Image: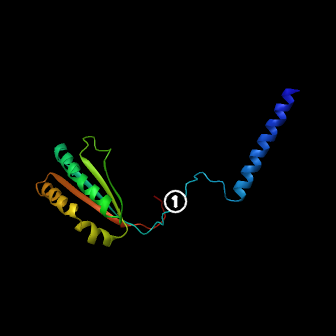
Amino acid sequence: KSTTMIGAFSYFAVGALFTHMFHSMKNNAFTTNSIESTRHPGNAWSLAVKMTFKEKSDLNYILEEWKAVTEYCRKNEPFLLHYEGGLVDSDPQGLTLHMLERYTSKDDYAQRHKSGEEFLKFRPKLKALQDQGKVAVEGYSYQEIGYGFV
């Protein structure tokens, strides 16, 4: 008798689950990701920069000097949406740094960020390494088109 009750309850539970799933899909409430993005894509302007250093000491020097820039930007540049560096994992020597910068507009980058107090202190240090052939800097920029998410 208890086996029959367990079987009947199992059929009822599975039926209730399928009914719930059917109604959820019908009402477009069934999603694989419950987190909704509040970002309105397509407005940000981004800059990607790759720096390839010849020596680990120069890379470490720039990373150390960059700390003041990141802290300044975090506190004083609300138009700077993303400011992150990372070591390129395809470089076995660990001498290639990739940076991604994301701004509310290209003008905010050109007129506001590049005139920031800490950026103006930092940029000549990187430029000196470039002039000495100790780092190669290349990059590209783009305007978002609005098909992705952050």
In the displayed structure image, the side of residue 105 where residue 16 appears, left or right? right
In the displayed structure image, the side of residue 20 where residue 48 appears, left or right? left
Residue 66's spot in the image, x, y percent? 23, 53
Front position in the image: 69 or 100: 69
- At label 1, counting other C-alpha atoms closer than 10 Å, the crowd grade (few under 14, some 14-19, many 20 or more) is few
Residue lying at the far left in this picture: please name it.
132
Asked if residue 76 is positioned above or below residue 18 in the image, the reply reads below
- Residue topped by disc 1: 37
Residue 84's spot in the image, x, y percent? 33, 54
Residue at 84% x, 27% y: name it: 3
Residue lying at the far front in this picture: please name it.
75
Residue 85's spot in the image, x, y percent? 31, 52
Asked if residue 56 is positioned above or below residue 106 in the image, the reply reads above
Image quadrant in which the N terminus is located:
top right
Front position in the image: 126 or 48: 126
Asked if residue 1 is positioned above or below residue 107 in the image, the reply reads above
Label 1 sits on a secondary structure element that is loop
Give the quadrant of residue 45. bottom left
Model colouring: rainbow
Q: Label 1 sits on what residue type?
A: Ser
Image quadrant in which the C terminus is located:
bottom left
